[in-house]
Amino acid sequence: MNQADVRIDTFKSLELYRESVRGHARQTAKIVRVCCGPGCIPKGARRIYDLFRKAIDDAGKRDITISLKGTGCQGLCERGPIVTVDPGNIFYLQVHEEDVAEIFRETVLQDRIVDRLLYHDERTGAGIRTSQGIPFYQGHVRVAFALCGVVDPESPDDYIGAGGYAALAKVLSSLSPDQVIDEVTQSGLRGRGGGGFPTGRKWRSARDAHGEPKYVIANGDEGDPGAFMDRALMEGVPHAVIEGMIIGAYAIGSSHGYIYVRNEYPLAVERLGRAIGQAQKMGFLGKNILGSGFEFDIRICRGAGAFVCGESTALMASLEGRVGEPRAKYIHTVESGLWGKPSLLNNVETWANVPAIILNGSAWFAAMGTQKSKGTKAFSLVGKVRNTGIIEIPMGMTLRQIIFDIGGGIRNGKTFKAVQTGGPSGGCIPEAFLDTPVDFDELTKLGSMMGSGGMIVMDEDDCMVHVAKYFMSFLKEESCGKCTPCREGISQMLFILERISRGEGEPGDLAKLDGLADLLAGTALCALGKTAANPVLSTIRHFRGEYEAHILQRRCPAKVCKGLFFYEIDPEACKGCGICLKQCPAKAISGERKKPHVIDRAKCTMCGTCLEKCPFTAVKKIV
Amino acid sequence: MPIVNIDGRKVEVQMEATILDAAQKAGIWIPTLCFHSSISHLATCRLCMVELDRGDWKQLVTACNYPVRRDIVVSVSSENAVKARRGVMELLLARSPESEQLKELARRMGIEGSPYPNVTESLRNCILCGLCTIVCEEVIGKSAIGFSGRGVDRVVTTPFRQLSEDCIGCGACAYVCPVGTIQLRVHEDTGEIEVSPFKSRAKLLVCEECGRRLVSEPVNKYIMEKVKIDLAEFRKYAKLCSVCRRKKSANILSLGTPMNDDDRKTENIKCQK
């Protein structure tokens, strides 16, 4: 059966089709899933996929059928590329090209485990066969990502076989638009893009808004440094995003939809485009969807990567073909958005949650999470944590659980210092607050925010002034420059931060930063400017001592800010090889051969060459 | 019609009127830079911040574009509002320290100088309010200038920073510029007008009767195309200065008495002025 020639025009035929897909799958004895997510592709997953394809073809016709799937992100990016073999959900990590033949011969054909490629328990050293046994996957509850890493994103049959488009059929066959909105409202779903606005309320306003046509938009302009959940979702289960949007369109009475994706995500653009084409052919998009008479279609709009275009009004300006700059939102976009018409904009993760809520019911979703933040949230866990990757956990899990249990703690035996959540609009949370349950309101209370779900873990080697400076310079680059406070205020704040990190800070600088932060929060035009000071404010709030060390003592405790620490040669460790002496561009190092060398602080320009070149790690940073 | 309580004064305004409209009606001054009554609200300068009392919480909003849809309570003189306007003005003064117009407005707000250093470069004190680009687009219909670059690198310029083919030298941009960035220069030797800093030049029309300089020739042509009155007399009159035009009309209507030489002399002086 080929999806190209099937058009599903009744609810019954969808179920029949689903049955036939499942029946077909039951005949498949083995399923090999190669993770082709954003983390595994750069590590060579594509090539591994090709080698498996070749191995299957070379094996010729056998009495077992083998199905090969290049899936979306399976989560544990740190140990990619990941290959799983079903039945048994055998989970192989860090698979290299030369391992493919072995996996194929042993596991696929003969049901034997390749122990070397399994996850090994750190204490016992025992190999763990399935993902369920791996600490990283403990506590995961997958809703939006339920099918990511399971289905082949390019196969609508796979998605349908796994229960796809059943929510759409349920909505179109048995629920009124109001019932759909009630269901979403009761689920307690809040916007996953960062703001956390109640989704049901937004849908209600969009339904009640006057004006035709109405638009439904998916925001795939993920721009936070370190965040790639939305990308994984669009690449991994594009049909889930599309299904969510169709349901939303039905709820508010819209027949036009847009997905706004940044062009830096070419695979997401490609897969979404293909999925839309497939959905159109099969009758999930277009006129008379599933024979219900409902009409809706989606187009993709590629953004040019401006961070500000993730802001709703700027996104809509960009969709209209104008410069992506925000406008005042005193009249909400649900009332007057794209081309001045009522527009319902949700983040792709929000959309992907919708089908699951419809299928399983609002009570199921609302049973997960905390009082005011229901359900689950996806995070991309990155930085100095041992297991980086994409996680989806119920709201209310503590930061400590996320970083130490799932993330496996800090790399290289270093100590935890802070976790940055919410991207450039968020803030840094220190050790003292690690037992905070993760939800929209708790993170806001700490001066950070949920944001779209980037979580950057930092250790003792990270300087908080430097981090604040990094985010401010990011925002200075990304500010559109339309309004005064954002354009001028961020530059002023960066000016002060640069001064502090050069060791030229003045005692009143922290108060000045505070004042500017207040001004930005109160007067900037859009959310980018209003929240721009959060990285600075939260680091001042939680790491004031570190700022004061920079300003008053002219030293950088984390030894990051150039000029605020020294290089020194440990006489015990130095072998007197002379490499640093030869390499030093300032000729600041002296010493006889085979005797400990010394750095002359007066001559040293702190370039760090000696630290880099020393083969015996004898060069140390000291404050 | 909704009632706006603004600093204790109550005024009734049209639905969707702005807080600034209400303030004007109430006789309360709110400083503005990027606002002009004939142009769309830009709300880019953020100078007109006022505090909206929402009962359980207060919010700073821009008066120039906040639409009044129900009875609201607004404070122009609250501490937060004054502080916000001061902050914005200080940032603008740091950017454009030499603009006399800006300094004058700051003085009216009770602000002398800025505590901030000059960290962003402005082209001849431009505050990037965008009035010039919008007037050119919306009122004149030419879009000869626009923004280029973004963030601190944003600048008002002609396309590709080349001489604009679309500029008709009307001077509307210079007229609306609140800080004196854009200026008109008349080049006596060539009889041209230059819109600075865009370097656009246009030949000035000369009154056929008295030789007084009128609008630029492209403006005259553009208006002729726009108004679509095909009257030879109108076309002829369009090339006269207002004084000569009135005089000629009066003569034609035989309402005026023929002038003697002295009269003519004084009229000529007036015209030349």
Image (tube, rainbow, N blue to C red):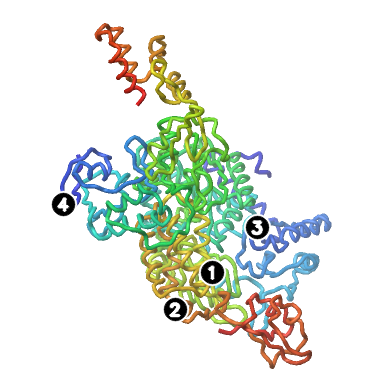
Between the residue at mark 1 and the residue at mark 3, the CA separation in whole angstroms equals 25 Å
Quadrant of the rendering where the C terminus of chain A is positioned: bottom right
Determine which quarter of the picture holds residue B136: top left
| Chain assignment, label 3 | A
Q: Nearer the viewer, mark 2 or mark 1?
A: 2
Residue occupied by mark 2? A548
Of the residues shown, which amino acid type is indicated by label 4? Answer: Gly
Residue occupied by mark 4? B8
Assess disc 4: are there few (<14), some (14-19) or many (≥20) residues with their C-alpha within 10 Å of its C-alpha. Answer: few
Task: Determine the secondary structure under disc 2.
Answer: helix
* Residue situated furthest left in the rendering: B9
N-terminal of the pair, mark 1 or mark 3, is 3
Q: Are marks 4 and 1 in contact (CB under 8 Å)?
A: no
Residue occupied by mark 3? A71
Of the residues shown, which amino acid type is indicated by label 1? Answer: Ile
Which residue lies at the image location 23% right of the left edge and 45% below the top edge? B23
Residue occupied by mark 1? A456
Position of residue A66 measured from the top left corner of the image (x, y, whole percent): 74, 58
Position of residue A496 measured from the top left corner of the image (x, y, whole percent): 46, 67
